[in-house]
Structures are given as structure tokens and as C-alpha cells.
Amino acid sequence: MSPKELQSANTLVWFRNNLRVTDNPALYAAAQEPGQTLAVYVLCEEYIGRHQTAPARVDFIRRNLEVLEKDLAKLNISLVLMRVLKAEEIPQALRELAKRNSCSQFFFNGEYPVDELARDRAVVEAMRAEDISCRRYHDRVILPPGTVCNQKGEAYKVFSAFRRRWWERVISSSLEPLGAPSAQAASKISGTSETSLNNLFEGLEQRDLSSHWPAGEAEAHRRLKVFLTDHVEHYHQERDFPAHPGTSQLSPYLAVGAISARQCLHAVLKTQGESEGARTWMSELIWRDFYQHVVVSFPQVCKHRAMQTYTEAFPWRYDEDKLQAWQRGETGIPIIDAAMRQLLETGWMHNRLRMVAAMFFSKNLQLDWRVGEAWFMSQLIDGDFAANNGGWQWCASTGTDAVPYFRVFNPVAQSKRYDPTGKFIRTYVPELRHLSDRQIHEPPPTKGYPAPIVDLKSSRAETIEIFRTLPRSTIPTQQ
Ligand SMILES: Cc1cc2nc3c(=O)[nH]c(=O)nc-3n(C[C@H](O)[C@H](O)[C@H](O)COP(=O)(O)OP(=O)(O)OC[C@H]3O[C@@H](n4cnc5c(N)ncnc54)[C@H](O)[C@@H]3O)c2cc1C
């Protein structure tokens, strides 16, 4: 390459939900290229609104960007911050930035939902029109979509079959995470940020939950270490009890990409790979991959469609009072109320409770699971389209490999089983603190606490009967 060519061979790296410098394939590859590396983050107002991004998540992104900016500076890489109103402005904004900084290459890590794919395609087209070459890497999953298929080359619809094949593929893959790239020579390209980090988020609703969720890669790795040292061994026994710190609480960090799933898998295999707890935890990482693959193979789920099309005939109700009671944690069912208040207070909810709350919503209240899905998204600090949609469709029995419609959790039974002493309920529902361990799951009339808004037994029976009689001309085939 001539000196002139070298000068113009800079590489622009686009950061999205991968806010870290280690095990970041696009950043790592850019740093191997001969020219200089420049990083960019684009905040799109339309995306934040359309995807119901929770204020807690907006704030978490801002705080993670703050850490990332400093971590990149140590590598002599500048992070350019841009804000656009509409998604359609992104291609031009990035193309102009690349041209201004003599970037002949553009690297990014892929995202899989329909909107994101369309956005990325438009950006790649705009870049190619300027002869800027583009490379897409995979970091959001351990195994990329399209690489875990059945004998006919089709995507799996059933998790257990997916998991078997996934393991076969993983064993033959390199799992060693990438380190951070070496620092480049002091950068000659500063990129001139269009705005400062504080201004970038100006006017957007943000909720500071930093005391629960400190930001950054180092914090994510600290949590992983504590989990692997103290908890993973008993994960299979502890993970369903919301009052115990039995799970990793890494989901916000995985969702924003402060840590990669591959780093998690590699660490657990190195330290605890053989234990039953570790195997159960790895299974959850595979569920995470599974739902990302579902989004690519069955993109209808990104368009508010049920995976099992026959369930679209279910006459979901519209009841604003019941919806608000559920959202506020005032349903009169203590475990549901504790769960929903945990979400409101911390931006996070324990997995067992996400299942119980979502099933109560769809099977007892018979409210449309899509409305519940949107509410979760608007509150969760770990909001991730694929996992959230997959979780909701599982609970509502509309999804691929979902719970059968006749298996409806009874929230009171779940409460007695997974919060036997009522410790979790007492944390979030102070009105019931004085009740005995036995009474707390099904309280007698209590001043300041509502009576149940629905009869669990009759609503369950009614839902099962409606599902049973839905016309099934379009039952999807199982693999
Ligand atoms: C209705 C519903 C909605 C959900 N919405 C989301 C969401 O928006 N974002 C999200 O990250 N998870 C979601 N989940 C999955 C799961 O509840 C959370 O990932 C988990 O509670 C996070 O806690 P943790 O980090 O301690 O998990 P751990 O038990 O420590 O698991 C480790 C990691 O595996 C992944 N994981 C675990 N369980 C699942 C699962 N069932 N599906 C997909 N990935 C999983 C997560 O990334 C998690 O951080 C949802 C589940 C349900 C039932």
C-alpha cells in the first residue's frame, strides 16, 4: 500500500449494544488494520421511543458509554457521539463521518431483530456507495444464527434439540475470548464529536439506578467472578428462589454488551464446567442464543405476531383497570405484587417471577401478552427484544416450544414453593409484613391491601377452555 493509500485506510467502528473493549470482534479486527481506528455511537430518538426503551436502560447506556469512552481513550481511540431524530438519518450521518475521517472501512457487530437488520443494511449500502468496505461480526450470541440447524438445514423450533446441536457445534468452536486490542499510536483523527456525553442524552427520560447497577466492563466481570466463586455450584438449587441471590444478575450487562456471553461461557467452563449448577447456568446462556436465533429464523415475531399462528384467534381482553393494577403491583396476589414492585423499584425482575407474572397476565387476566411484553420493555434495565419476546410467548403458550396451554402456574402455589417464608413478599409489599409465613401468600382482608382482582381457579379454567377450542388449521410443525 502506498503512503497515500495508507493515509486513507482508517477504519470506523460502530458501537451499539456491545459497549466494551474486550472480546469485541469488530473493534479487535479494526485495530489489526494498518490505518487508525475511530469509534462511533449513534443515539436515535426514534429507536428509543419505538422500542419502548426503559428510562433505566437509557441511563445505563449513558453510564456504560462514559466508561467505554475512557477505556477507548486508553487505546488512543476516540469515540464520536452523534444523535439523530430518525433511523433513516443514520446511514448518511455515518457515511459523512467516515468520509470526513478518511475511513475506507466500516466494521460493526450484528444485531438481529427486523428493524436493526434493515437499519444495518441501509448503512452498508450507503457506505458501499462511497467505496467504503463493510464487515459485520457476531458478538451478540455464542454461535451465530444460521449455524445451529437440523439435518435439513432448517432452524430448530424446539429448545432441547437446539441445545443438543448447539453443544456439538460449540465443542468444535474456538471459545477463547478476544482480549482488548493493543493501543494504537496517538490518534491523528479525533473525529470531532458532535456532542458531549451529557448533551447526547439531553431531554430523554433517564432513571438513575446506579446503586443497584454500577456501569462498565470491570463491574460486569466482578459480578461474574462473585457468581462463579460463590453461587454457580448451587445455581440449579437456588435459581428459583427470588429472596436468595442465586442468579448472576448479569442480564443488564449482557443486554448492553458490557460483557459477552462468550466471556461468560469461557469463564464458567474454566472454573466450574463439570458441576450441575454450571451446566444449568450454561443452559440459560443457550436459551439466550436460542431466542436470538428465533428472531432471525422467524422474523414474524418482530412484527407482534405469535409463533403459533392458531393462537392469534385468542380473544385477549382489554381491561385498563386490571392492566394498571398489574403494572402497579396492586392485584391482591402478593407474589405478583412483589414481583411487579421489584420491577418498578430496581428495573429488574427475577426469572421465576417474570414467568409467574407473565402467565398470570395472559392466563388469569387474559390480557394480550403483547401489552405485557411492551410494559416489561418499558421498565427493564435488561430489556432485550429476543429474550423478552421469547419469554412472553413461552408464558402465553403462543411461542415456539412454549409451555402447553393447559399448564398454568398457580401464583399462590408458586409463592408457597419459591418464597416459603414470604421473605421476598415482605421486602416489596410492606402492607403484608405483619402476616404469618402461612397467611402471607393468601392474605385475609388487610387494611391498605386490595382483594384479588381475579378468581384464579375460574379464570384458569376459562383460559384453558378457550385455548382448547381454538381452530387449529395452522398448527406449526414440530421438529
Ligand atoms: C416474560 C419474560 C421476559 C423476559 N425478558 C427478558 C429481557 O428483556 N432481557 C433478558 O435479558 N432476559 C429476559 N428474560 C429472561 C430471564 O428472565 C432473565 O435473563 C434473567 O432473569 C436475568 O437474570 P440473571 O442475569 O440473574 O440470569 P441468570 O440466571 O444468571 O442467567 C444468565 C444469563 O442467561 C440469560 N438468560 C437466562 N434466562 C434466560 C431466558 N429464559 N431467556 C433468555 N436468556 C436467558 C440472561 O442473559 C442471563 O443474564 C425474560 C424472561 C421472561 C419469562
Image (cartoon, rainbow, N blue to C red):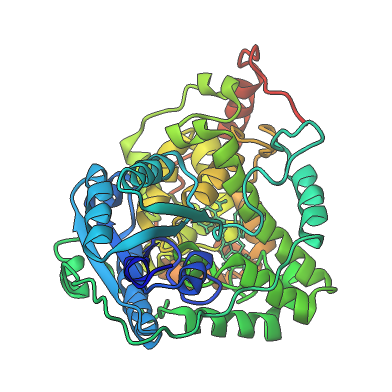
Measuring from the top left, give residue 333's x and y in whole percent: 50, 52
Q: Looking at the figure, which quarter contains the N terminus?
A: bottom left
- Most extreme residue toward the front, as rendered? 2
At horizontal 66% and vertical 60% (from top left) the residue drawn is 285
Q: Could one spot residue 313 in this view of the protein? A: yes
Measuring from the top left, give residue 234's x and y in whole percent: 76, 75
Residue 213 lies, with reference to residue 18, above or below; the image says: below
Q: Observer-nearest residue: 101 or 339?
A: 101
Residue 223 lies, with reference to residue 312, above or below; the image says: below
Measuring from the top left, give residue 256's x and y in whole percent: 44, 65
Q: Ligand 1: give its quadrant.
A: bottom right
Q: Looking at the figure, which quarter contains the C terminus?
A: top right
Q: Is residue 36 left or right of residue 177?
A: left
At horizontal 37% and vertical 57% (from top left) the residue drawn is 379
At horizontal 64% and vertical 73% (from top left) the residue drawn is 177
| Figure quadrant of residue 465 | top right
Q: Observer-nearest residue: 366 or 385?
A: 385
Q: Observer-nearest residue: 453 or 269?
A: 269
Measuring from the top left, give residue 121's x and y in whole percent: 40, 42
At horizontal 60% and vertical 74% (from top left) the residue drawn is 178
